[in-house]
Image (cartoon, rainbow, N blue to C red):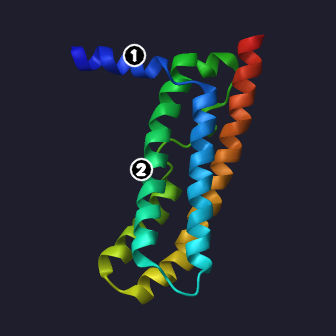
Amino acid sequence: MHSNSSKSKADKKISLKSLQKEHDKIEQELQELEVILEDKEFNHSNFLHVFKKVCDLWDSHETKEKYFFESLNAREMGIPVDTLHFNNPELRGHKKVLQEAIKSGSEFELKVALETDGRMLIGKLRRDIRNDNELYYKALREARG
């Protein structure tokens, strides 16, 4: 019972501002991934660190975002929650390809995966962030009446 009440308290602290700050953190890490992709000297350990950070931030963010919109009764406010992609299968697919390339131990395979799935993942995460931000502003306008 204690863990459920702790979770409820944590859920109440989720705000549009905190979600937007998380978008900013994710964007910073996406920029770092792009730098790694463009660098002539591939820094494997730096890539692993940044990729893990992006995945952790995004996973945590999706969970918070889902709770936030559920707590708002967003559908009743006219917010198209169906357009939100909690656990987006496209993103998960790109992530899995990159994880498999990491596991392969082949730097060539990893570089190929980064050039394709890595760049697609970055672009789609940015697209989702833009779409989410539009919904955040709609939620804010609706809340203010």
The image quadrant of residue 15 is top right
The image shows residue 94, relative to residue 89, as above or below, that is below
The image quadrant of residue 120 is bottom right
Return the disc, 1 or 2, that comes first in the chain's sequence.
1
Inter-mark Cα distance, 1 to 2: 21 Å
In front: 111, or 116?
111
For the point 62% across and 58% down, the residue is: 124
* Residue 84 can be seen, yes or no: no
> Helix, strand or loop at disc 2?
helix
Give the position of the N terminus as an image quadrant: top left
Q: Which residue is mark 1?
A: 9
In front: 21, or 74?
21
Could you classify mark 1 by the number of other residues whose Cα lies within 10 Å: few (under 14), some (14-19), or many (20 or more)?
Answer: few
* Residue 54 can be seen, yes or no: yes
Three-letter residue code for mark 2: Asp
Could you classify mark 2 by the number of other residues whose Cα lies within 10 Å: few (under 14), some (14-19), or many (20 or more)?
Answer: few
Q: Which residue is mark 2?
A: 56
Q: Left or right: 101 with respect to 145? A: left
The image quadrant of residue 22 is top right
Residue 75 image position (x, y, % from top left): 62, 22
In front: 106, or 82?
106
> Helix, strand or loop at disc 1?
helix
Three-letter residue code for mark 1: Lys
For the point 56% across and 63% down, the residue is: 121
Residue 3 image position (x, y, % from top left): 25, 20
Report the number of numbered marks: 2
The image shows residue 141, relative to residue 33, as above or below, that is above
Residue 119 image position (x, y, % from top left): 60, 70
